[in-house]
Image (spheres, rainbow, N blue to C red):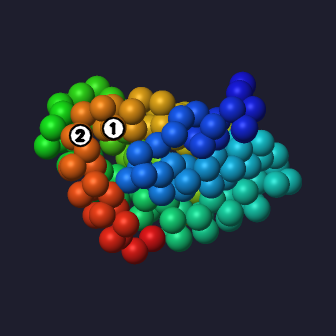
Amino acid sequence: MPSPASDSPSRLVKRHPGLAPLSREHQHTLSIAQRLRRATPSTAPQASAAFLAVWELEEKQHFRVEEEILLPAYAAFGNPTSPLVITVLLDHLCIRRDAQALLNGAPLEVLQALGERLAAHVRLEERELFPLIEATIPEPDMRILQGRLEGVGR
């Protein structure tokens, strides 16, 4: 399994300034994912509570921004039915499902699986989705996207 440092988005590639804030948020997500993956019966309640706090404060909004601003911007120039886009959206759905399960006292295996899913999701966005967006959306439109992303209160 890669070390947390090797998963770090900032070490993977320099992002377009418009996507950099989303990449920085991914760094925080990776630390939460690691905590979930490493949860034990004694640390599970704290790991679950930490995830749920971040979920409410940051992650729900992060997903909305990607779904309501980022992916529609991509769809204006690229294939909205791309398997990559579909996978990202399905990941969002499964992560939401697992967050709800944690609210209902999910078993340790769900916490650990959620940690794996979160880490894999961040890697997918950083290594595949963001480069696709950067390669597809023309620079003037990337600047417009940047302004829209900066205008979102996060």
SS class, disc 1: helix
The quarter holding residue 49 reads bottom right
Looking at the rendered image, the quarter that the C terminus falls into is bottom left
- Callout 2–callout 1 Cβ contact below 8 Å: yes
Q: Is residue 137 left or right of residue 115?
A: left
> Which residue ends up furthest to the left in the rendered image?
76
Looking at the rendered image, the quarter that the N terminus falls into is top right
> Which residue ends up furthest to the right in the rendered image?
42
Residue that appears at 25% across and 44% down? 139
In this picture, is 74 found above or below 57? above
Please tell me which residue lies in front, 140 or 13: 140
In this picture, is 94 found above or below 25? above
Q: Which amino acid does label 1 sit on?
A: Glu
Whole-percent x and y of residue 67?
A: 30, 52
SS class, disc 2: loop
The quarter holding residue 74 reads top left
Residue that appears at 55% across and 54% down? 24
Residue that appears at 72% across and 38% down? 4
Whole-percent x and y of residue 142?
A: 27, 49
Whole-percent x and y of residue 15?
A: 46, 43
Q: Which amino acid does label 2 sit on?
A: Ile
Please tell me which residue lies in front, 57 or 137: 137
**Mark 1 lies on residue:** 134
**Mark 2 lies on residue:** 137
In this picture, is 37 found above or below 52? above
